C-alpha cells in the first residue's frame, strides 16, 4: 500500500509538471490571440464572437454527459475491454451532441441575440461534435496517465491555431474571421486528440453498441454532467448576465479580462483526469485517509500556483489589459476580481474531484446553490451601479466589475461548503491552505508596487517575472515540504 501511495503521488506530480508546462505554452499562445482580436477586430466584434461561443460551448458541456470525469470511473469498474467502454462513451455523447446542435441550428438567436445572422453562423453548432469527441478522447488518454496529449491539443494546437488563423482570416473577413478561426482551432484540436487515442487504445474489435448500457451510462452520469455544467457555467454565467445589461463592446472587454483570468483555471481543471483514477482506486480500497492527503496535496499545489499567477497578472493589470488595446484598460477591475475568483474556486474544484464519486447529488445541490447565489449577487450588485458616483459612460465597465465580484463571492461560498462536506465524508481533515502563502503574497505585493512605477514596457517585461519569481522563491523555501518537491523532480 505505501508503494501504491508513492506511485500515486508521483503520477500526480508528473501530471502537475506537464500541466504547468502546458499553462506556460497556453499563455504564450493566448496573448497573441487577444492582441489580434482586440487590435484588429475591436471590442464589438469580439463581444459578438464571445457570446456565440459561450452558448455553443455550454451545449457541448452538457453533451459531454459528465464523461470528462465519469469515464475514469466507468473504465475502472467495467469488466469489458477499455476500447468498448470508450466506444460506448463516444456513441452516447454523439447522440447528445446531435440533439444540442439541432436545437441551436433551429434557434440561432440563442447564439446571436443582439445581432443579425451572417453567412454560415447558423451552422456554428456543428463544432459541438468536435468539442465533445476531443474531451472524451483526452479523458480516455488521461486515464492511462497520458497528459501530454492534453497539453498538445489544448495548450499548443488549439490556441496557436486560433491565433494564427485570426490574424490571417482578418484579411478575408473582418466580420467573420474570429468565428472561422475558432472552427479551425476546434477541428485541429480534435485531430490532435483522436490520433493518440487510436494509438493508445486501438480499434474496438468486436464492439457492438448496447442500447440498454448506453442509456444506463447516460443516466448514471446525469448528476456528474449537471455538476460539470454548473461548474463550467459559473465561469460563463457572468458573461451571459452581463450581455443582458451591457453593450457588445463592454462584453468584448469583459471577455478579454475573462480570458486572461481563466488561464490559471487550466491548472486545476487539468488535474481532474489525473485525480480521477487515483481517487477511484482508493475509494475501492476504502483508503479515505490517502484520499484526504492527495486532495490536500494537489489543492495546495493548485492554490500556490494560482495565487502567484493572480499576483503577477493582477498587480500590473492595467498594463496587461492595455496590451490588447487602450479601450480594454477599463476592464482591469473586472480582471482583478476574476483572478481572485479563480483562487477562491480552487478548494471547491479539488474537493469536487472526490465528491463526484462519493456524494454526487449533494455535490450537485451545492453547485446549483452556488449558481443561484451568483445570479442573485450579480443582479444586486448591477442594480447598485447607478448609485455609484460615476459618469454614465462608465456604468457598463462598473457592471462588468460587479458580475466579476459576484462570481468571486459565490465561488468562495462553494469552496467552504464543499471542503466541509468532503472532510465529513472522509472523516479526515483537509489541509489545503497553508500559512506560508501569506509571507509569499506580502513579498510579491511589495515587489509589485515597485514594478507599477516603471514604464509600461518595463512593468510587463521586468515586473511580471520579478513578482512571480520572488513569490515562488518564498513558497519553495518555506512552504514546500519533501512531498511537495516531488512536483519538481524529473
Image (cartoon, helix red, strand yellow):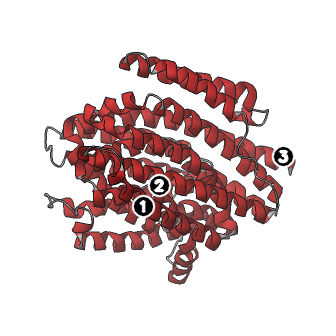
Residue with the mark numbered 3: 3
Badge 3 or badge 1: first in the primary sequence: 3
Q: CA distance from mark 1 to mark 2?
A: 9 Å
Measured as percent of width and height from the top left, residue 118 is found at: 14, 58
Residue with the mark numbered 2: 406
Residue with the mark numbered 1: 380
For the residues bearing labels 1 and 2, Cβ distance under 8 angstroms: yes
From where the camera sits, is residue 197 visible? no
Q: Secondary structure at mark 2?
A: helix
Quadrant housing residue 130: bottom left
Measured as percent of width and height from the top left, residue 217 is found at: 56, 75
Badge 3 or badge 2: first in the primary sequence: 3
Name the residue rendered at 63%, 59% in the picture.
352
Question: In terms of depth relative to the viewer, which is nearer, 284 or 428?
Answer: 428
Question: In terms of depth relative to the viewer, which is nearer, 322 or 293?
Answer: 322
Left or right, 259 with reference to 311:
left
Amino acid at each position: 500500500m505505501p508503494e501504491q501511495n508513492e506511485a500515486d503521488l508521483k503520477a500526480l506530480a508528473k501530471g502537475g509538471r506537464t500541466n504547468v508546462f502546458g499553462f506556460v505554452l497556453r499563455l504564450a499562445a493566448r496573448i497573441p490571440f487577444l492582441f489580434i482580436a482586440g487590435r484588429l477586430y475591436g471590442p464589438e466584434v469580439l463581444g459578438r464572437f464571445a457570446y456565440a461561443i459561450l452558448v455553443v460551448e455550454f451545449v457541448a458541456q452538457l453533451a459531454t454527459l459528465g464523461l470528462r470525469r465519469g469515464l475514469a470511473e466507468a473504465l475502472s469498474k467495467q469488466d469489458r475491454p477499455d476500447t468498448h467502454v470508450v466506444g460506448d462513451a463516444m456513441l452516447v455523447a454523439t447522440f447528445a451532441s446531435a440533439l444540442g446542435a439541432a436545437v441551436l441550428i433551429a434557434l440561432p438567436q440563442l447564439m446571436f441575440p443582439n445581432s443579425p445572422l451572417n453567412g454560415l453562423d447558423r451552422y456554428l453548432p456543428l463544432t459541438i461534435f468536435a468539442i465533445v469527441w476531443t474531451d472524451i478522447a483526452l479523458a480516455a488518454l488521461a486515464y492511462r496517465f497520458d497528459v501530454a496529449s492534453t497539453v498538445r491539443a489544448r495548450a499548443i494546437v488549439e490556441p496557436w491555431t486560433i491565433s494564427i488563423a485570426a490574424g490571417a482570416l482578418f484579411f478575408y473577413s473582418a466580420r467573420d474571421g474570429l468565428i472561422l478561426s475558432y472552427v479551425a482551432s476546434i477541428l485541429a484540436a480534435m485531430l490532435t486528440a483522436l490520433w493518440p487515442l487510436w494509438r493508445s487504445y486501438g480499434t474496438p474489435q468486436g464492439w457492438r453498441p448496447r442500447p440498454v448500457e448506453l442509456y444506463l451510462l447516460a443516466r448514471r452520469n446525469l448528476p456528474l454532467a449537471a455538476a460539470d455544467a454548473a461548474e463550467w457555467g459559473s465561469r460563463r454565467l457572468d458573461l451571459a448576465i452581463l450581455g443582458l445589461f451591457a453593450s457588445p463592446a463592454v462584453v468584448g472587454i469583459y471577455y478579454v479580462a475573462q480570458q486572461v483570468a481563466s488561464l490559471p483555471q487550466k491548472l486545476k481543471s487539468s488535474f481532474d483526469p489525473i485525480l480521477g483514477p487515483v481517487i477511484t482506486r482508493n475509494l475501492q480500497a476504502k483508503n479515505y485517509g490517502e484520499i484526504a492527503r492527495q486532495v490536500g496535496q494537489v489543492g495546495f499545489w493548485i492554490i500556490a500556483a494560482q495565487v502567484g499567477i493572480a499576483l503577477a497578472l493582477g498587480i500590473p493589470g492595467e498594463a496587461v489589459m492595455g496590451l490588447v488595446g487602450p479601450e480594454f484598460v477599463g476592464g482591469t477591475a473586472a480582471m482583478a476580481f476574476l483572478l481572485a475568483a479563480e483562487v477562491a474556486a480552487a478548494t471547491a474544484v479539488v474537493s469536487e474531484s472526490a465528491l463526484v464519486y462519493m456524494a454526487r447529488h449533494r455535490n450537485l445541490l451545492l453547485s446549483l446553490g452556488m449558481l443561484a447565489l451568483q445570479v442573485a449577487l450579480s443582479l444586486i450588485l448591477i442594480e447598485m451601479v447607478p448609485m455609484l458616483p460615476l459618469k454614465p459612460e462608465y456604468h457598463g465597465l462598473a457592471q462588468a466589475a460587479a458580475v466579476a465580484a459576484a462570481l468571486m463571492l459565490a465561488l468562495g461560498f462553494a469552496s467552504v461548503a464543499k471542503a466541509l462536506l468532503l472532510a465529513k465524508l472522509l472523516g479526515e481533515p483537509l489541509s489545503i491552505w497553508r500559512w506560508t502563502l501569506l509571507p509569499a503574497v506580502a513579498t510579491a505585493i511589495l515587489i509589485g508596487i515597485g514594478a507599477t512605477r516603471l514604464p509600461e514596457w518595463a512593468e510587463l517585461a521586468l515586473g511580471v517575472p520579478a513578482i512571480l519569481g520572488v513569490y515562488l522563491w518564498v513558497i519553495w523555501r518555506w512552504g514546500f515540504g519533501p512531498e511537495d518537491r516531488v512536483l519538481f523532480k524529473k
